[in-house]
Image (cartoon, rainbow, N blue to C red):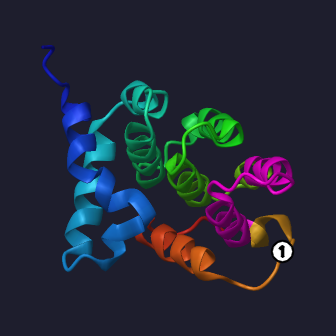
Amino acid sequence: MAERSAAELYVVEVYGRVLHANFLYDADLDGFVARITEQAADMTDAEIESLLTYRNWRDRIVGAYLAGFGRRTALRDTIGALLLESDHIYAGQGYSFALAAFGEEADADWLAAYLDRWLRTSERYDQPWALGALMFIDPVRGVAYGPADSEHETICRLVSLVGARKS
């Protein structure tokens, strides 16, 4: 059996905590944020991208959180395209967080494109997360999509952990 890489071992350690942003309820929230931020800083864009394009949602959601906490805007189009494809349930939670953490108009464009495609179908994936992320970025676009909901509040809380938002 092949030995697992450090990145793959990291996924096993944290995917359950980033799923549904469960870590927000950890007693050691600050410690978790510090560790994932440090892990993101220690990884290259290529390593994070390999997680984003791996074959399951666990690697992809962790890769997206690493991209968000590491502010890896070079991965924006990869993340946006993966969100638009929406071929792995739960991964869209991470993609939405990463795009909100980047917080620029291009990120809002990816989120709006995703919602335009997927709100018109009966398929329910991570649309509430994408809507929450888009509502977080609203001030960049000068658009208001509606009242805050729990996913919007979750995204706002998540992004506040990344650090000061760009003006």
Q: Nearer the viewer, residue 18 or 77?
A: 18
Vertical comparison of 135 with 9: above or below: below
Q: Quadrant of the N terminus?
A: top left
Where's residue 109, x and y in %?
80, 50
Give the answer, above or below, for where 104 lies relative to 27: above
Q: Nearer the viewer, residue 144 or 119?
A: 119
Asked if residue 125 is among those painted magenta in the image, a careful observer would answer: yes
Question: Is residue 165 among what the camera can see?
Answer: yes
* Residue 76 on image: x %, y %: 62, 40
Tell me, yes or no, whether the highlighted magenta stretch contains residue 96.
no
Q: Position of residue 94 (x, y in %)?
A: 50, 52
Q: Is residue 40 left or right of residue 130?
A: left
What's the magenta region? 110-137
Asked where in the image residue 103 lies, by quadrant, the reply is: bottom right
Q: Secondary structure at mark 1?
A: loop
Asked which quadrant contains residue 100, the reply is bottom right
Residue at (48, 77) in percent of width and height:
157
Residue type marked 1: Tyr
Quadrant where the C terminus is found in the figure: bottom right
Q: As drawn, which residue projects farthest toward the front?
A: 122
Question: Counting other residues with Cα less than 10 Å from the Cα at mark 1, is it few (<14), some (14-19), or many (20 or more)?
Answer: few
In the rendered structure, the answer to whether residue 58 lies left or right of residue 85 reads left
- Residue at position x 71%, y 40% in the image: 84
Q: Nearer the viewer, residue 84 or 56?
A: 56
Q: Residue furthest top?
A: 1
Numbered label tally: 1
Q: Nearer the viewer, residue 160 or 82?
A: 82
Residue for badge 1: 145
Residue 82's x, y, as percent? 62, 36
- The answer to whether residue 37 shows anywhere in this view is no
Q: Residue at x 66, y 66 (%)?
A: 128
